[in-house]
Amino acid sequence: MSTETNPLRWPSTDNAVSRLFQETVGLLEQKDVAAELQQLLQAAESSNIPATLSSASCSPRLETLKRALEKARKSVFELEVSNATYKLDGTNVGLDASGCVYGRNTVVDAAADVYMKTPLAFVRSFSEEAAAVQACVAECTGQKIEKLVLVGELVRTDAANLNIYDYEHAGFRQENWRVFGALARAEFENRQAFVETKKILHARGFSVLSEEQNTKEEFENNNAEFAKSQILRVAVDARFREMFPRLPYVPFLMDKFQAANCINEDRKMSFAKLVLEHPAAHEIVATGRQEGLVLLMAGAEAEREQKESSTCSSTELWKWKGGQEAAGGTVNMLWTFEKFLKQHSSVSAEAAAQRLNEVNSPSVEDKDAERNLNMSPLLASVFTEEECVQLKSVVERLLKVYENDERVDLNADGSVREAKKKKAKANKRKPGAPHPSKASYNIE
C-alpha cells in the first residue's frame, strides 16, 4: 500500500443547512445581541431617525449579524441551482492522464488492482479522457497544466455497500466510478494571474469553484507571499458533460427539476424554488431513497476576490442530505432559525419602533416577546415580508426531511428490499426530532 500523500485533494462539500444558517444562528445565540439592537433603536427614536439599520449605525456585532442575514438571503433567493445530482455513498477517487489513481488522502499503489475492496479497472479505463480534459484546460487558459486529476465517487462493490439504495439496480457493480469534478495544478506569477485564469475558464463555460471552498494550503496567510503553484477546481455541469461525453457521471437531475413552475423570470432556479416548488427534489432527500442531493450553486463571488476588486463569478457545491444520515447540529440550527422567523412574523419593524418603551415595562415578563420585539427591525432591514414568508416555508420543508430516518434499499430488479426488523424503541421520538444515533436536542 502506498503512503505517498495525495497532492490534489478535493475540498469538503458544504452542508446546505450549515451554509445557509450556521453563521446567523451562532450570532443569534450570543448574549445581549437583542439588547444591542434595542439600544440602537432607542437612540434612533430619540434623534427622530427612522428605525432602519445601516452599516454605519450598527455596532460591529450587529453589522456582522446583518451581513450574515444578507448572505443567507442571497444564498436562498439569488444563487442559481445550475446542477443537481444524487449524493452517492462512496469515497473520493481521482485519475490522471498517466493512469495513476488517487485516494482521498494517499496515492494508490500503481500495482494495485483493488482499492477499498473495489476493482479499479473501470476507473483506469478513462486515462485518455483525463488527458483530453487536461489538454482542453491548457488550451482554454494558455497555461501549462502540471497535472490534472479527474475526481469521482467510487461506489464500493462489496455486498454491504452495493446493496444500499438503488446501487445494484443502477449498475454500479460494473460502472463503479462517477466523475463530479477536476483538479488542475499550474504555476502563476501572482494572484491576479490566478484570478484572471479562473475568469477565462468561467467565460469558456467551466464551473470554477469559489476560492472560499478551496483548501487552506492554497494560499499563504500573508497575502504578499503568494504561492505560485495553485489548484484550479472545476465542477461537472451540463457543459462539462457535453464536452466530455465518454466519462461516467453521477445521474443528472436538472432536466427533471427545470419545470415551468420552478424557474424564475430569468430562467434560473433558486434554492428556495427548488425546495418549495419542486416536490421531486424534496422527495429524493426526504424519503430515504438516496443519501441526498449535491447542488452546484452558481453566482457566488469569492470574498477574497471581491476585496481585490477582481470579482469572478464562481460556483459552490452544497450537499443536502436525508434524515437517515447523521444530522449533527443541523436540526437544532433549523429550529433556532425557525423560532427567530416566527417571532418576527407577528411584529413589524414599525410596531417594534413604537413599542420600545413597553419592552422596559415591568409588566413584560415574556423574554421571548422581548427578543421578538427587539430583533424584528433587523430582519425587516434585510428581507421583504414576502421573503420572510417564503423563508419560513423553506425552513419548514428542510425540517420535514428529518421526520424520516429510514433508508430505502432496492433489489437488483428495482423492487424495494424488505427492511430488516428493528427492535422496538422504548421512547418514540417526536416528529421532526433526530433519531437516537444523532445528537440530542431540547425539543420545545
Image (spheres, grey):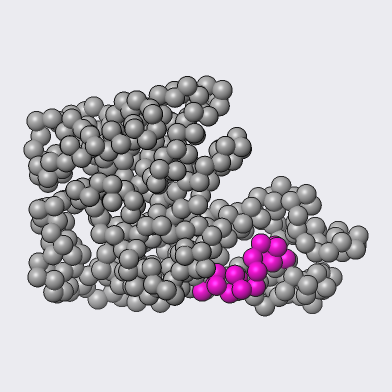
Q: Seen in the image, is 317 located left or right of residue 303? A: left
In the image, is residue 273 above or below residue 162?
below
Q: Is residue 22 visible?
A: yes
Q: Where is residue 17 in the image (x, y as percent from the top left)?
A: 46, 59
Which residue is painted at 49% across and 28% down in the image?
A: 193
Which residue is painted at 87% across and 61% down in the image?
A: 49
Q: Is residue 184 magenta?
A: no
Dominant secondary structure of the residues highlighted in magenta in the image: helix
State the residue in front, 350 or 180.
Answer: 180
**Quadrant hosting residue 439:** bottom left
Q: Position of residue 234 (x, y in %)?
A: 36, 42
Residue furthest out toward the right: 47
State the residue in front, 394 or 200.
Answer: 200
Which residue is painted at 28% across and 51% down in the image?
A: 242
In the image, is residue 128 above or below residue 73?
above
Q: Where is residue 125 in the image (x, y as percent from the top left)?
A: 12, 41
Q: Tell me where the magenta segment starts and ends, as one range.
A: 377-393
In the image, is residue 251 above or below residue 121?
below
Q: Seen in the image, is 328 located left or right of residue 44? A: left
